[in-house]
Image (cartoon, rainbow, N blue to C red):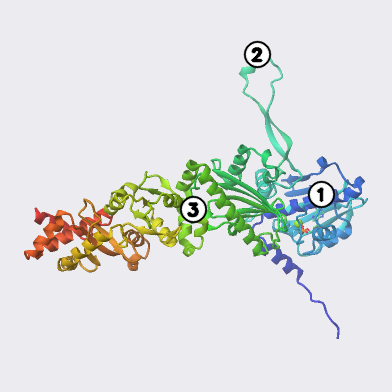
Amino acid sequence: MEKKAFKTESKKMLDMMINSIYTHKEIFLRELISNASDAIDKRAFRALTESSLGLDRSEYKIEIIRNKEENTITIRDNGCGMTQDELENNLGTIAKSGSLDFKNENGKQDGIDIIGQFGVGFYSAFMVSDKITVKSRAIGTDCAYVWESEGADGYTIAPCDYASFGSEIVLHIKPDTEEEKYSEFLDEYRIRELIKKYSDYIRYPIVMNVEKTRLIKNESEDAENANSDAPKYETYEDTDTLNSMVPIWHKSSDEVTEEEYASFYREKFYDYEAPAKVIRSKTEGTFTYETLLFIPKRAPYNYYSKDFEKGLQLYSAGVMIMEKCADLLPDYFNFVKGLVDSEDLSLNISREMLQHDHQLKAIAKSVEKKIKNELLKMLENDREKYEEFFKEFGSQLKYGIYSDFGKHKDVLQDLLMFKSSEEKKYVTLKEYVSRMKEEQKSIYYACGDSVDLVDMLPKTEAVKAKGYEVLYLTENIDEFALRTLMKYDDKEFINVCDDKLDISTDEEKEQLKAENESAAELLAFMKESIGEASVTAVKFTNTLKDHPVCLSSEGGISTEMEKVLSQMPGSENAPKAETVLEINGAHAVATTLKGLFATGEKEKVASYAKILYTMARLISGLPVENPTELSNMICDLM
Ligand code: ADP
Ligand code: MG
């Protein structure tokens, strides 16, 4: 039986290829520039052994020529060129990479960073062209060939004249359509932008003729005429190099000034301020990569909006592959900007993704570690700067603790800071623990809308009076973060308003227990009057110095957490705090209540209970449940 080869529908193949592997049409320029750079690398490599084929290092270049009349862009290089066979094999066959063959034959060479490997980059030019003409003359040969194709229908090859070694690729740009303005690829600013974005660190100059204007010098230098005429300008052509060639992260550290880092950062990451910190590193081994990271001074304007995207730029051998690689940054460090560059990345065909997840994971892990260490160093050596940083991005770190059930607490807990009762200044958990009282077992915190409000809470005062420091939690996320941590250095976090708060002596506890037991009927009556839905219990307390009442909570949800949860969307079923109304046993109100209850004036006890409960809510920063009733009760009293 005759065996037949599968026939591929080449037109469909090419269409599919061109339109499905790339997300952005603009990358065609990156691909052609990379090919030109590869070609020059190959020529330089050949010249190592056949010096007559080479050029002086300074003569290698890639030219971009725009022709608006003809609607063409030409990319010209003085690299290795292609023979007739090579044109046939490399451009005539989809997915055939002469560059990959070259790498396989010659191995990894110092100073040669061949970029190509998939044999599809060239075809990306069909996204913007309806015809491509390639003229090429291979090094060491006398004849040149022209390859031409309108895409899917095939290609032609014929001899032609071409003066020097190298290639030129002429793209006949498609006419504009409603959706796509192809003609903009002929604009100087657009080409400059694309080269800066993708090909800034190609190691050979990318040059382009551009139009400039200059002042015409006044030939007749006599003083009388000099002022009378308005200044005249003329336009002239000049050749500009569009790329910087040497990436800033390839220069040795002592060669780059702080100002250079800052202007690089501002330009590439669109900030108007210099970064707070520059972090640079190189990891060498089987998998080599460099990182250049920046911690911004301020959060970008869209930081808290949905369209903020985290991520680092990803470069492969100096060519930008991805603008925002999100997998390289954990969410809690999402404010970090910067880039990773590696020659060893295995990329997928469109260079828009990495092929191997474990490479990314390894880089991400070391990026995380570097950021953490750098922040800890800043905390240690430049407290002021760290506090500035923390004001800007601290919530993100706290959010990081809270999310993923505390999986990242080891990374983050030592980066946290809270204001505290000590000096109302920021304190780290480590600092707090280091100055704890000898007999103190737990870390105390209190919550409220501002440092001053928290400072005035009756329970805060009580704990302070014992000589214990109290952390002041004023952001919504704060208590959630500490509850996720549960402990620091084996010390439990305790909300001063939690009924777990235990700062009394054994003797005081005994006394209190007796007092509560003897007033059990009164307390139960008060609880009933206020309503079971509002309070779980009413108790006497001995921790309240001069204050008559306060609220505390039992169980997992504090009143502060209840407040936060009730503000979230869909909060109807949000869990509520189990609230306890605490009454200062040593206060005059306690005596009054006991007296009234003993003489059977229950109605008064009931309304006093409600008034005390409302007062306690106000002190905790909670809304009044029934303002009209409260107002009536107060009027009755008067
Ligand atoms: P890749 O660059 O991934 O190999 P391309 O489709 O971009 O794939 O290019 C295919 C091949 O064509 C390259 O491997 C190279 O051998 C050849 N080629 C493309 N452009 C040039 C050029 N300007 N000079 C010499 N050879 C080139
Ligand atoms: Mg290529």
Give the percent coordinates (x, y) of residue 233: 66, 28
Circle 2 crowding by C-alpha within 10 Å: few under 14, some 14–19, many from 20: few
Report which residue position mark 1 lands on: 40
Q: Secondary structure at mark 3?
A: helix
Labels 1, 3: front one = 3
Viewer-nearest residue: 289 or 152? 289
Mark 1 vs 2, N-terminal side: 1
3 w.r.t. 482: above or below? below
* Kind of residue sitting beneath label 3: Asp
* Kind of residue sitting beneath label 2: Ala
Asked if the beta carbon under badge 3 is closer than 8 A to the nearest atom of ligand 1, the reply is no
- Tell me the CA gap for discs 2 and 3: 72 Å
Residue sitting at 60 percent across and 58 percent down? 365
219 w.r.t. 506: above or below? above
Is residue 13 toward the left or the right of residue 478 in the image? right
* Kind of residue sitting beneath label 1: Ile
Residue sitting at 74 percent across and 51 percent down? 33
Give the percent coordinates (x, y) of residue 324: 60, 55
Mark 2 vs 3, N-terminal side: 2
Give the percent coordinates (x, y) of residue 214: 68, 30
Circle 3 crowding by C-alpha within 10 Å: few under 14, some 14–19, many from 20: some
Viewer-nearest residue: 503 or 273? 503
Report which residue position mark 2 lands on: 223
Ligand 2 is located in which of the four quadrants?
Answer: bottom right
Is residue 496 toward the left or the right of residue 219 in the image? left
Which disc is residue 414 wearing? 3
